Amino acid sequence: MVLCCSIENLHVENCARAVPLSGHVGFDSMPDQLVNKSVNHGFCFNILCVGETGLGKSTLMDTLFNTKFEGEPTQHNQPGVTLKSNTYELQESNVRLKLTMVNTVGFGDQINKEDSYKSIVEFIDAQFEAYLQEELKIKRTLHSYHDTRIHACLYFIAPTGHSLKSLDLVTMKKLDSKVNIIPIIAKSDAISKSELAKFKIKITSELVSNGVQIYQFPTDDESVAEINSTMNSHLPFAVVGSTEEVKIGNKMVKARQYPWGTVQVENENHCDFVKLREMLIRVNMEDLREQTHTRHYELYRRCKLEEMGFKDTDPDSKPFSLQETYEAKRNEFMGELQKKEEEMRQMFVQRVKEKEAELKEAEKELHEKFDRLKKLHQDEKKKLEEKKKALDDEVNTFKQKKTAAELLLNQAQQAGGSTTLKRDKERKK
Amino acid sequence: MSVPSCQLFDQTKEECGVMQSPLVDFSYVGIDAILEQMRRKAMKQGFELNIMVVGQSGLGKSTLMNTLFKSKVSRKSVLATSQEKIPKTIEIKSISHDIEEKGVRMKLTVIDTPGFGDQINNENCWQPIMKFINDQYEAYLQEEININRKKRIPDSRVHCCIYFIPPTGHCLRPLDVEFMKRLSKVVNIVPVIAKADTLTLEERDFFKKKIREELRSNGIDVYPQKEFDEDAEDRMINEKIREMIPFAVVGSDQEYQVNGRRLLGRKTKWGTIEVENIAHCEFAYLRDLLIRTHMQNIKDITSSIHYEMYRVRRLNESNTAVTQANGIPEHHLSAHEM
């Protein structure tokens, strides 16, 4: 027996009524509960550093995170761009961070750089793909999945002082819809202050005119809106990295020492390193992760699924078109594969037949030739034999004639032999 | 459960990475600022909580809801019906409220089930409720597999189901056992002894022990479930809670003057029962469990365990449907009996 029931949903999502509380309930501890859970779980953050060899990417990472990451400087003779990623576990008070740094090895070193951006785009897509696969699995473990999607891309611009290189523009244009790009001017102690201001303006205007979407620090939350909007105007950050310490006054500071002075990394008058650290880590790390997940990943997912042929069903059609479409697609794909296989097989058989026919033809020809030759040879032989016979006949005839002639001669001799002698004697007389 | 305080921009020496330089002052990176960032994000987004109350009429479900959230959130307060008729069939009514406390906004949805257990023949009365719960999972799943999906998928899944046990003092009734057996597989169940002011302390302890035994012998896993304890610390905390289940509660939205303070309570001729006094009833424990300490955990278990189980079942179902359509014989079908 099925009990019929009526389900009344008075709950309209957008206009739930606001009720005042008459005492302390206690759900203000919710943010703490949420934070607690995240702390237990740990965080992960993935940074991609794109830039030519020798721009100080590894040094900057060391400086940012106050630690010495492993690795040696790369050579300049790489045949193509490869991406090397390393994961580190950092801890600060009770926060555990799984930091992954991906470096582009060999970027900008080739003579022909047309395909340089490709391996970077492929890498980023591969991380999205891995996440998508996990999300689409039937039995999935999303909450314990190690997220490898790139949350921030630091693009290192060479400190030429003039403008962006075309490689930079092309690469950034390809990456801006896939990852949060934060452009920085590397080794900026090579540029003077006035040149730097002009350089920054030039870079920003080039980015704008080429339609490159770089990451904007969010300004919708009042507590950070002000600092973020100020920082937005300082992009791209001009940074200097250093892990060496120099004594200034009575403190040891990270700096680069030159004969003409010392560039202090954490001095805001000298470079924008502090700003970068502030923005990247202390203020917007969570927003970077969120943007990656809700904007870039969703875009990738949408494109990928549409490419595979899925469509959103309208509200009153059967549910679960995803699974069914997937199965249907898979069957279609297998069918196609089979068809292709058949086709190839047919083609193969055809070719074999053709070749066979060809060979047969050739064989036939050979046979014919052989026959002809044989016939020729036989004809010749016959002719020769005839000739030989003719000759033999002649010889025989000659012999006969000769015998006959000799006989006649003998007879003639015997009969007139005396006569011949008499004649001879008379002659002698 | 202690709540760690977050320290922002504190220039303390950190144990970061490999290198530790005792001379350097500015070795603070700022990774722990992410906690503050998360908190900000959470405050901006707000929270959602969906609670279902199940029990026979007259057990004080609406009152308890109002007491828990210190405001008129129950169905009865919202829909003032002139006569309280017991409905002929089970109805499922859900009402949403926006509440705010100290800057934290929450969308609370109370799902009421009038008519449950009130008929003469209560066979299969859990079916509409299970269907409702599964429908919410289905709605979430549909949204999740969309190509164009919303930034935040609206969460209408039932996070917690409070089951009201009438204070008979003996043991669980067959209806209670049947219901909880089935529902504990799809949702977090928190059983409570309703109107516990009719039981003395000894009767209460005896009743609770009986109930716990019966739950154990029937294999009913109520919240907090043993198998989802994450580590030793969790287990310790949850064991303490498990020893107290089911909570004996008394609800009230009336305030009375007791010892010079205004407290929520029930006034009778022989004394006033203070709702929030743990010597009188266990309402405070329930409130702490549900709201102050385990709310996030309840939501997590719903989304990462119950919902995932539903999803696996659903995906396998449709898988086998498709394979059957393709003429391939299926070897497995985990049909979850309702």
Image (spheres, grey):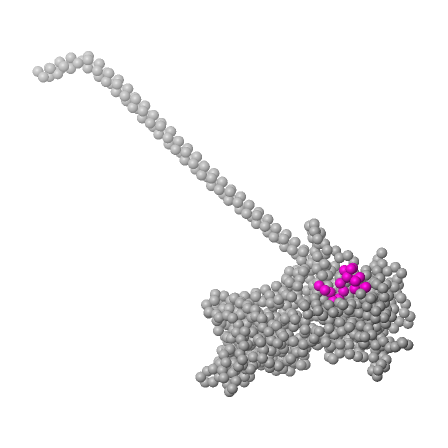
Task: Tell me, yes or no, if residue A26 can be seen here.
Answer: yes
Left or right: residue A247 versus residue B173 is: left
- Residue at 51%, 68% (x, y): give it: A105
Where A395 falls versus B147 (above or below)? above
Q: Nearer the viewer, residue B111 or A109?
A: B111
Residues in magenta, as a range: B210-227
Residue drawn at x 48%, y 65% is: A79
Instruction: Say if B309 sits above or below A278 in the image.
Output: above
Quadrant in the rendering for residue A407: top left
Residue B29 image point, x, y percent: 58, 78
- Furthest toward the front, the residue is B202
Specify whether residue B83 is painted magenta.
Answer: no
Tally the numbered discs: 0
Q: Looking at the picture, tell me which residue is in the foreground, A231 or A366.
A: A231
Whole-percent x, y for residue A289 in the image:
63, 72
Whole-percent x, y for residue A88 in the image: 57, 70
Q: Quadrant of the N terminus of chain A?
A: bottom right
Location of residue A133 (image quadrant): bottom right
- The residue lying at 86 percent from left, 70 percent from top is B199
- Identify which residue is drawn at 77% across, 57% down: B337
Residue B76, position as x, y percentages in the image: 86, 72
Specify the farthest residue to the left: A429
Q: Nearer the viewer, residue A162 or A328?
A: A328
Quarter of the figure with the C terminus of chain A:
top left
Q: Is residue A339 above or below residue B106?
A: above
Q: Quadrant of residue B127?
A: bottom right
From this viewpoint, is residue A17 visible? no
B120 vs A193: above or below: above
